[in-house]
Amino acid sequence: ERDCSVQRRHQKVLEEAPAPGVSPELRESLGAAAVRAARAVDYVGAGTVEFIADASAPDHFYFMEMNTRLQVEHPVTEMITGLDLVEWQLRVAAGEPLPLSQPELSLSGHSIEARIYAERPAANFFPASGTLRHLATPPEEGVTVAPAEVRASTDGLATRVDMGFVRGDDVSVFYDPMVAKLIVRGPDRAAACRRLHAALGQWQTVGLPTNVSFCRRVLETPQFLAGEVHTAFIPQHHDALFPPTPPPPPHLMALAAACWVAEMQPPAAHAAHAGHAAAAAAAAA
């Protein structure tokens, strides 16, 4: 199972596995309910069943929907099971049996995924569009598929980046603004939180706004670190997640204005400017 409670506009932002606060008994009940839902419609293939639980009584959960596919957050399940779910999906579609039975599966370590969106969190997460003029991501480390004893130790620390765009691409208004997924694994939840926070700090994007800083602030809240996640998490902790933003320093404003003026110049002016620069360089030489 996975937890996807931290959402904005009813869309997921951070997902993790195992889900905080889910007991082995509740995990068993969720799995059994998901199997009954699939069998009720004679479904064969990879699928994801979503439930919503009562925060005051997690054992009281309710069916929401079933997606007949893997979901965006499936890498966190892969990270803690050491399985390649995409491979399994293809094998089942080809008529092959599942490689392992349920009792043969094991959960080890903890994994969290951050969805990197081109958006403006402070403007009610309004989607952004534009060109990715610069994009640098944290280095990938470790492997997704690893033995249980490795996943549960510091040897199993991992960082994975699933990209949807590269530098120079345009993020348009016609599609979902998710740029990438950043997935980490640690031996426990605290280690996974620290690793994701550090990895987000290495993310660089120029050309359009993202939710990277917002995700870091979520990971800094004591409530998230304590596993107190729910669907009202963002509005409940609004003040901590949306602190006042100071204006940029004057020298950056001046530099931005100069860049904007340069971009607004017609091509001929650019060529003339380049010629003047070359002449000046020659004269200096």
Image (tube, helix red, strand yellow):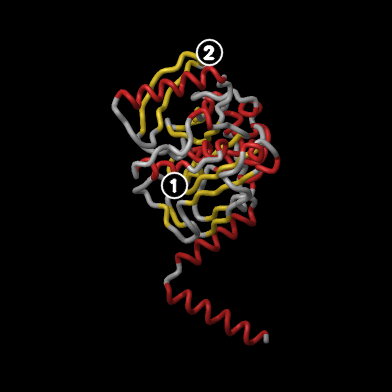
Position of residue 152 in the picture relative to residue 54 (left or right) = right
Residue drawn at (52%, 39%), measured in percent from left and top? 78
Q: Position of residue 46 (x, y in %)?
A: 39, 37
Q: Tell me, yes or no, whether the two marked residues, 1 and 2, touch with CB atoms within 8 Å.
A: no
Of callouts 1 and 2, the N-terminal one: 2
Q: Position of residue 245 (x, y in %)?
A: 60, 40
Residue drawn at (66%, 44%), measured in percent from left and top? 198
Name the residue tied to disc 1.
Answer: 128
Name the residue tied to disc 2.
Answer: 56
**Secondary element type, mark 2:** loop
29 or 76: nearer the viewer = 29
Q: Position of residue 130 (x, y in %)?
A: 44, 54
Q: Position of residue 47 (x, y in %)?
A: 38, 34
Question: Residue 248 — which label?
Answer: none
Residue 114 can be seen, yes or no: no
Looking at this view, name the residue that lies furthest to the right: 154
Total numbered labels placed on residues in the image: 2
Residue 248 can be seen, yes or no: yes
Residue drawn at (59%, 23%), measured in percent from left and top? 228
276 or 178: nearer the viewer = 178
